[in-house]
Image (cartoon, rainbow, N blue to C red):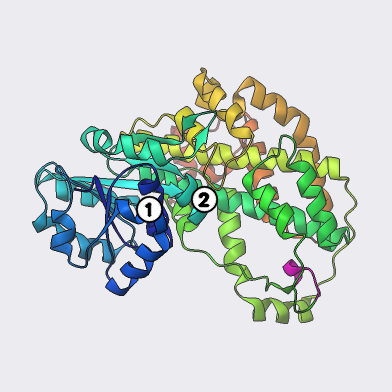
Amino acid sequence: MAQIGIYGLGTMGSALALNIAEHGFDVAVTNREVDWIAPFMTEAGDLAVRLHPHEQLEAFVAALNTPRVILFMIPSGPPMDAMLAQITPLLSPGDTVIDGGNADFHDTRRRAAQLAERDLHFVGLGVSGGEAGARQGPSMMLGGSDHSWAQLEPILTAIAARYDGIPCVARLGPDGAGHFVKTVHNGIEYADMQVIAEIYSLLRNGAALPPAEIGALFAAWDLGPLKSYLVEITARLLTYTDPETGHPMVDVIKDAAGQKGTGRWTVIEALRLGQSASMIEAAVGARGWSSEKPTRQRAEAILGGAVGAFDDTPEVLAEAFLAARLLTYAQGFRILAAASDAHGWGLDLATIARIWRAGCIIRSALLDDIADAFDRDLPQGELILAPEIAQTFARCLPALRQVVCSAVHGGHPVPALSAGLAWYDSMRLGHGSANIIQAQRDMFGRHGFERLGRAGLHHGPWWD
């Protein structure tokens, strides 16, 4: 009998199945397109002895130890609901069903409540790291019941990425907690990638450096505080040459970036929670605008596409990059904290930072410091007010200001860098301009002046 079943043998499902089998667990496998099963078993090689293929759903379910554990790696949305409708009649009380895709956490909460009525457990499992992570060790964010975590913990801790020997997986809360944390993870990823793209653009279009030289600079940055998976792969990709043209590969790739929606979900949920996700929104907006290549080309012909020189030093850029990355994390963790309060999840932000240190796309050297900061009592609970983090900002923010000013002066678009700086400045000021907005709102009615006066909001001429 198998200890876990995996439905869906696409890129991620097949990689996870092999990872689980390699760690000594028996895995039942199946797929909607049954002709995928035989090639998968062939490719599994020696691991095939722990893989038990089935073409019929009933046989797949019957092959599992009870209470059953079934992991679905299929597209989110309607396909998941359709699959649940098929498999639920075959399950027994105490069984656990896991959605390992990038699902809307609202759907996960709804499904968890529906299955709970049948004494079934539904888990939303965020899996980060792509195909390589799924095969070698992903970072995983679980939302579900204590019962389901007890069933899954031995398997997930065995296959997870490790940082200093600690598995990068945790139960973060009930129902949609895991999928929400994965959504925000992806939002942070969007913003970090956009910041990297903006810095690359300044060096390529403003400083006229060739890609390989920029790649060498990113490789040097990856040896210090900016060390991260995204910096590492950026350094590598900038050294590639297109074999057909002999040009740098990055110059051959069309500058139109796709997106799957999780960044947009992060922004939507942040707004619902009354939080700012300005850097993530900038990244989502930049990707959307990038897709309109013909419009941008026409605009360049009419509006002009010239940009000025950019001559800030690599040292200044590195400090600005560090500040921007910290601001990206700070916005993301504020969204997580707000959602935890709103939904009663009790998210442990230090734990989240720690399970992101290996296996996931946004792993970086900064996460150790962030986890340590959340372990302490933060002023107002704010990451940017942690003493060590505040000291880093004190050192790096002048560089971020300089880079943003240089970019704006030269006509270089830096939506994420400038959004991060504006957010920081809004946060650090004990006074602001929202009073004029509130006054304007109060003036919309017929008796605006009188209402302001009765509220004691002005004590003299209205312009005071």
Residue 441 seen in the current view: no
Q: Which residue is mark 2?
A: 187
Q: Secondary structure at mark 2?
A: helix
Q: Which residue is mark 1?
A: 47
Task: Residue 435: name its quadrant.
Answer: top right
The spot of residue 29 in percent (x, y) is 28, 58
Residue 83 seen in the current view: yes
Residue drawn at x 35%, y 52% as measured from the top left: 100
Residue drawn at x 39%, y 32% as measured from the top left: 347
Q: Which residues are magenta?
A: 246-251
How much space separates mark 2 and mark 1, taking CA atoms? 35 Å
Q: Residue furthest top?
A: 377
The spot of residue 157 in percent (x, y) is 38, 35
Q: Who comes first in sequence, dot 2 or dot 1? A: 1
Task: Residue 238: name its quadrant.
Answer: bottom right
Q: Is residue 456 left or right of residue 319?
A: left
The front one of 429 and 359 is 359
Q: Which amino acid type corresponds to the residue marked 2 in the rendered image?
A: Gly
Q: Secondary structure at mark 1?
A: helix
Q: Name above or below for residue 325 compared with residue 191.
A: above
Residue drawn at x 69%, y 72% as measured from the top left: 253
Residue drawn at x 57%, y 45% as measured from the top left: 362
